[in-house]
Image (cartoon, coloured by chain):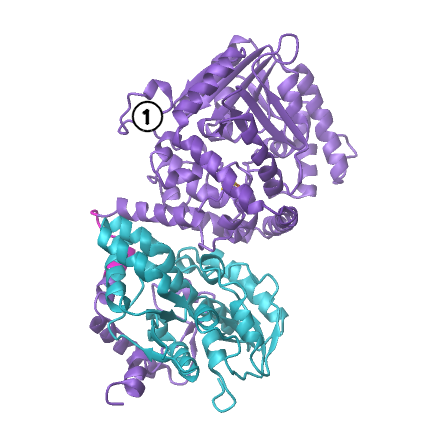
Chain colours: A cyan, B purple
Amino acid sequence: MTRVALFATCFNDTMWPQTPQATVRLLERLGVTVDFPAAQTCCGQMFTNTGYADEAIPLVRSFIDVFGSYDAVVAPSGSCTGSVRDQYADLAARAGDPGLAADVAQMTPRVHELSEYLVDVLGVTDVGAYFPHRVTYHPTCHSLRMLRVGDRPLRLLRAVKGIDLVELPGAEECCGFGGTFAMKNADTSVAMGGDKVRHIRETEAEVVVAGDNSCLAHIGGLLDRQRSGVRSMHLAEVLASTEEEPA
Amino acid sequence: MSSPARHQSSAGGQDIPHARTTSTFVGMPKFPAMAKEALANTQQRHNLNHATHTIRAKRAEVVDEVPDWEALRVDGAGTKDRVLADLDTYLLQLEDNLTRAGATVHWARDADEANRIVVDLVRAQQVEEVVKVKSMATQEIELNEALEAAGISAWETDLAELIVQLGHDRPSHILVPAIHRNRSEIREIFRAEMGKVGKPAPDDLTDDPARLADAARLHLREKFLRAKVAVSGTNFAIADTGTLVVLESEGNGRMCLTLPETLISVVGIEKVLPTWDDLGTFMQLLPRSSTGERMNPYTSTWTGVTPGDGPQEVHVVLLDNGRTSVLADEVGRQALRCIRCSACLNVCPVYERAGGHAYGSVYPGPIGAVLTPQLRGTGSKVDQSLPYASSLCGACFDVCPVRIEIPKLLVRLRTQVVDEHRGGAPSAEAVSMKAAAWMFADHRRLEKAQQAVTASSRLFGRRTSLENLPWPATSWSTARNAPAPPRETFRQWWLRTHGEDA
Ligand code: SF4
């Protein structure tokens, strides 16, 4: 039987519980046994990307402690997965701890972003979802350029029953979130987000979907402020949606 | 490795000179403030958006035509890495071959030294003006200002540089220094300023690009024909032949390189390529990445002095100005692979909005955000803010023809900025980061904090999003709503539905 550890991510756990919940529902529906190791907290990305590497190192150690024994870890976040796969090696090197570096090298290939896990590990693209709405998809930068998830999320979305999937103009351009960039360079961040939201509204989609709630918080926050009526949803929620249990 | 600039070969890493923070940019407001100003300039934003998107599309098209683009990138990066790993050897070989071909080689540790060398060389010719072909290295050291202080006028001959110079402006792009200007602004600059320093613009000048180019040509021709001394930069310096290479699009550079009697080239020490053969890769990478052209329009190469043909006195100033300190960092040194193609600027969503001036340096955009604090150090406020002038979207790495991992280097520099502030009085940010790290160190602490979040959800009733947030989140909520906290965290839900006794 397939077994996987869920890394909910601290942000989702605290602010967007519906996303890891949807991930659990979806994986269980596909016959996967999901574990949620309760000792997990945060991957450390916010610290690493803001320059606080020393503060991130204990979180690398704890991530290894919590998830090191699993064959597969799945996270509904391109950017947290990216931080583990792309930055942990550098952090271990900074810690000057060869043991940690070896553990990181062992561990990181087993950490998957949701769409990668579904397509590459489980080998499915039709997850049996039903979502009768007009949807546009924003490929977040870390999914796109750090993890190179490619068109996996789109393949999953295209297989959803009832969906009306429309292409997003300028899809590959950054929405302007960028972690603490959204606060430190708020004006530039909002200018970037403004263009992203304009493109989303051009598509006349009811829902904008992405694989990262952090980017969606920024995009959704702008859409809400404009009272656009466009909903922002995580990919997991769309994929978990069924006729019996619509999202 | 030992330091490549000869007179400091005894330096043991300690007294390696650092680039000085040059005067033009000292005291500049830091990036967010400068970006805010630029964002308010709607004309400039429009100009930038139009220009970057046009050139971005052109580049993507011609890059897609090359079946082995990735192999070329790897090759380009590899060649540059090879040079950087053994820079002292290649530089000495370059010096030997330049000298043998009749050029005079000078070594400059920093901006002051380089400027002094050039000023002395120009003075020796007893002239009061020089023509210049676009050179970022001379902008970096502020040569024009140094020449002016010595009573020598330096005329920029690249069209975009001319616009910047006549407009008493600063360049805002590596390749298109006047990218922030549109045609009608350029017409106004030409009409108002050309007459003050040379041949005036025709009275009936329109903003038709061909007419503007004509006006520039006539204005510049007069200067070319008069000039006895030219100053240039170099795209590549080939070690095994002693050949310097300049790529440009207008032919004005060629006039500078061939007409005057004396030619002085200021060359950053990272510009070396081992052999003539290596140039082939870069002749493919550079034009496609920078102007979106398949082939470069004007490529000039010269090897020392050819009697009776071209400049009869050729000087080469090999410039360090902080480069050896960048070289000392094994990861950070990849920034010296940069061939100044500007592809990273043209795809950068931050550059597109903030404009080049916000970076407070001659090197704007993603590479500037990395290179400037590397060259100058992270001592000043503006240099501390530059590594944060990025959303880390990674588009810059994808287009970089020499595969510089700009996002990784930005994160590295952020770490440097934070590390340099450890030990002193902690900032509000450092305090909150430490507090957050403490909370995340143990899941029970996180759960406690989460209880406060879910408890606060009662305050917001049915609202799903919030308009006003208290400090320090106000910079978020000026334009963005925030999600209302949920009533139950994920882990509470998990315990309820999947817990041991569920
Ligand atoms: S960093 Fe790369 S993309 Fe940017 S200017 Fe340099 S070579 Fe070009």
Q: How far across and how far down the image is residue A207, in percent?
A: 55, 76
Q: How far across and how far down the image is residue B365, in percent?
A: 50, 45
Figure quadrant of residue B205:
top right
Question: Quadrant where the N terminus of chain A lies?
Answer: bottom left
Residue drawn 47% across the image and 58% down it: A189
Residue drawn 46% across the image and 66% down it: A215
Is residue B431 part of the magenta span, yes or no? yes
The answer to whether the residue bearing label 1 lies less than 8 angstroms from the nearest atom of ligand 1 is no
Against A46, residue A16 (above or below) is below
Q: Chain of mark 1?
A: B
For label 1, count other residues whose C-alpha is less than 10 Å away and answer few (under 14), some (14-19) or many (20+). Answer: some
Figure quadrant of residue B454:
bottom left
Nearer to us in this view, B285 or B156: B285
Q: Relative to A157, is B114 on the left or the right?
A: left
Nearer to us in this view, B425 or B93: B93
- On the question of residue B81 being in view, the answer is yes
Q: How far across and how far down the image is residue B242, in percent?
A: 52, 19
Give the total number of marks visible in the rendering. Answer: 1
Q: Relative to B100, is B330 on the left or the right?
A: left
Which residue in the rendered view is the most extreme toward the front?
Answer: A1
Three-letter amino acid code at the position of disc 1: Ser
Is residue A3 part of the magenta span, yes or no? no
**Which contiguous range is marked in magenta?**
B423-434
Which residue in the rendered view is the most extreme toward the right?
Answer: B204
Against B445, residue B260 (above or below) is above
Return the residue at label 1: B2
Does dot 1 land on a helix, a strand or a loop?
A: loop
Against B325, residue B416 (above or below) is below
Q: How far across and how far down the image is residue B421, in percent?
A: 26, 46
Nearer to us in this view, B482 or A245: A245
